[in-house]
Image (tube, rainbow, N blue to C red):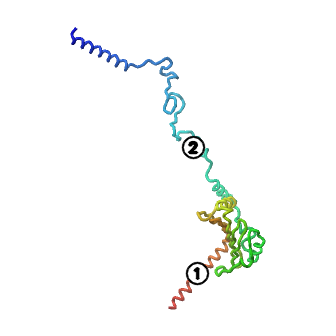
Amino acid sequence: MQWGSRLRIVAGFALAVWVCAEAGAHQTPRPEPGMEPGSEAAGSVAPGGGLAGHDREYIPAGNVDDEPAGNQAGTPDDNPAGNPEQEREEQNQENGDLPTLPRGFRNLTFGLTRDEAMEELYEDPGFDFRGDPDVSFRGHEPGGVIDTDGFDFIDRGVFQFYEDRLYLIILSLDGGQLDYFTLYRTLSDRYGMPTRLDPSQAVWEREGVRLALERPVSVKYLDMEVFDRIREEGRARETERGRARREFLEEF
């Protein structure tokens, strides 16, 4: 057989093999028994693990908008309502249940005369009161001031008078035994949330009394009625002083 004839036979055989392979690649495979379309076993796995064709609803992972109410993170069912202190304060205000602010410390209350306050200081174990050496009279404070050392939790007490009546108490406390936040929590639990709050102080004010907790650790009691009167009188003095100054200048 000549070489040309042999080459034509080999090429024809290779072409037949290629045609058969292409036909087999496009043939639809016969389903296995039990896997025919419409059977329960034929369900395919949906993205995320759900079975296509079943009644189970598929919820994409991370999409909380489709979750039932109450199962979403951050819902009221999982997290209690906001600040309990604020809620308590609002409830107290609605019910008128805010307690009365103290008009002084222990038996040292607004309105005592200087002599009466001195007697109380002698008896109070929280103060190292020495009598007259702790009493002073300042030109701008006509009622006088008692400035005394304290014991234990109290470092120092200042008691200020106007027209011989106690109207201001300042207690400087021992920061080694008491801290600002402990006192703030104590006063808030007892008298409600403060009227004013800033980084330097917390202030409770009502019914003519101002109670202030100041940093580092001091507590002030102020009779607002007396304080307002002093402030008005001070303004009147300033006005009179300004008038006298103008009249003096007119003399030149």
- The single residue placed furthest to the top in the displayed view is 1
Residue 88's tag is: none
**Spot occupied by residue 210 in the image (x, y as percentages of width and height):** 66, 68
Counting the numbered discs, the total is: 2
Q: Which of 130 and 242 is in front in this view?
A: 130
Amino acid type of the residue that numbered disc 1 sits on in the rendered structure: Glu
Mark 2, residue position: 73
- Give the camera-side residue of 138 and 93: 138
Amino acid at the residue labelled 2: Ala
Q: Which of 195 and 109 is in front in this view?
A: 109
Residue under pointer 1? 238
Which quarter of the rendering shows the N terminus?
top left
Q: Position of residue 86 (x, y in %)?
A: 63, 56
Picture coordinates of residue 239 (x, y %)? 57, 81
For the residues marked 2 and 1, what is the alpha-carbon distance in whole angstroms? 63 Å
Query: What secondary structure is found at the residue carrying circle 1?
Result: helix
Q: Answer above or below: position of 64 versus 97.
A: above
| Residue that appears at 61% across and 52% down | 82
Marks 2 and 1: CB-CB under 8 Å?
A: no
Does 54 sit left or right of 185 as displayed?
left
Please tell me which residue is depicted at 38% across the width and 19% down the height of the picture: 27
Q: Residues within 10 Å of mark 1 (few under 14, many from 20)?
A: few
Kindly identify the residue that appears in the image at 37 percent across and 20 percent down.
25
Instruction: Name above or below for residue 221 compared with residue 60.
Output: below
- Closer to the camera, 78 or 177? 177
Give the x, y percent position of residue 240: 58, 83
Please tell me in which quadrant of the rendered image residue 69 appears. Answer: top right
> Does 157 sit left or right of 74 as displayed?
right
Residue found at the far bottom of this picture? 251
Q: What element carries label 2?
A: loop
Q: Picture quarter containing residue 209? A: bottom right
Q: Earlier in the sequence, mark 2 or mark 1?
A: 2
